[in-house]
Amino acid sequence: MSLYDRIKSGEAALSLIGLGYVGMPLAVAFAAKGVRVIGFNRNQARIDLYKSGIDPTHEVGDEVIANTAVDFTSDETRLREASFHIVAVPTPINQDHTPDLEPVENASRIVGRNLSKGSIVVYESTVYPGVTEDICVPILERESGLKCGLDFKVGYSPERINPGDKVHRLENIKKIVSGMDAETLEEIRNIYNIVIEVGTYPVSNIKTAEAIKVVENSQRDINIAFMNELAMVFDKMGIDTREVIDGMKTKWNALNFFPGLVGGHCIGVDPYYFTYEAERLGYHSQIIAAGRKVNDGMGAFVADATIKQLILAGKRVRDAKVVILGVTFKENCPDTRNSKVHDISRRLNEYGITPVLVDPQADPEGARKECPTPLVPLESVKDADCVILAVAHQEFCELSLEQLDALFAPMPNEEKIVIDVKSVLNKAALETAGYRYWRL
């Protein structure tokens, strides 16, 4: 009997190692199809939240978590009950922009210590080509005492979940799958097809699958960098970038990219994995590295534009009260990891400004790790000189002109500064009302 048949019948269990924005929805999806799922995370506090029916990621919701059949645990020995292991831990970068493989290496040690013969281990964590076979497999072998290819098999299937996206979901995003041999690939493909409604896309080898992940995000990073560069130049020319983009999009083959802050754990990280391995092999990236440099500088650019508007409005910069709406890395998502909004805050600090941070959707614990300045509720904000809309959360996009005005100190409208990073506010209405309005 194949491992797929054993999984489907309930004879064998499946494990998820890492229960964040990627692993948890995947565990829940398999459990909803009747698969016996062991959800492992070393963070006992997160396990307790899930067991209490609380979804801190907002990806599936509290009700789904409360009713899922996933067996959540922080006891790694429970992994011995599973024969199909999916590793979905973060792969961040170090301060010098080199890959930080410690999470995936630690996960490999945990799986290796609890690996049984006949098992398959699939990695979903974003890595550069070669990591699964050259780094993870030796760890699995060393910790388990088993031989890859003989006692267990491996594969790679890059995660493609888009946090906060309610349209492009796990089940309707085609899944890249790969295995160390044809037999393993077929098992992996069949098992993922249990939950992926639109099906899987098999590729010939693991390195190709690893490359697909870093390249698809590097491509987005480069395109956004191009729009960011245009926005910086147009700012000097006195041209509205959004109006240019809207006009450009009337042509059938225009690409739908906008300027903005590029953070998070995918687009803001994956290109560094690609350039790291390229440089290790003797090739110095030009386009990808240049795009990263542009995007990494956008927080400082927005902060400098804010300072310029404060000066033009006659404000004393050090005394100015600046409110930043949103600290997560993207809209309608609680994830604050690698958020470039904090680059705005840090740059303003250099001018003697400690901005007020507001984000009703941000994970409080994650926000504290990223920035020492505590978050405040929106309803407590008043007497602002400048409001920066940095993240397009629904709550912020729906603010009326009266609600936005209530955030400011009593003063003439021409002294009230609105910085619209996401270009989502009604420019005409704000300018007609006399506000000093600037958008990226």
Image: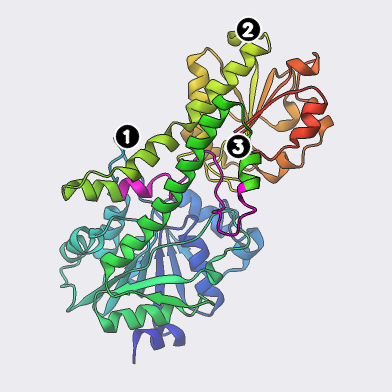
Of labels 3 and 1, earlier in sequence is: 1
Q: On the image, which quarter does residue 131 sit in?
A: bottom left
Q: CA distance from mark 2 to mark 3?
A: 28 Å
Residue 436 locus on image (x, y percent): 72, 22
Viewer-side residue, 411 vs 378? 411
Q: Which residues are magenta?
A: 248-273
Secondary structure type for disc 3:
helix
Q: Which residue is mark 2?
A: 316
Can residue 321 be seen at all in this image of the molecule? yes
Residue 244 colored in magenta in the image: no
Q: Which residue is mark 3?
A: 241
Can residue 114 be seen at all in this image of the molecule? no
Q: Amino acid at mark 3?
A: Thr
- Horizontally, is 43 left or right of 258 in the view? left
Residue 269 colored in magenta in the image: yes
Residue drawn at x 30%, y 49% as measured from the top left: 273
Q: On the image, which quarter does residue 88 sit in?
A: bottom left
Q: Which residue is mark 1?
A: 95
- Horizontally, is 300 left or right of 235 in the view? left
Residue drawn at x 65%, y 42% as measured from the top left: 392
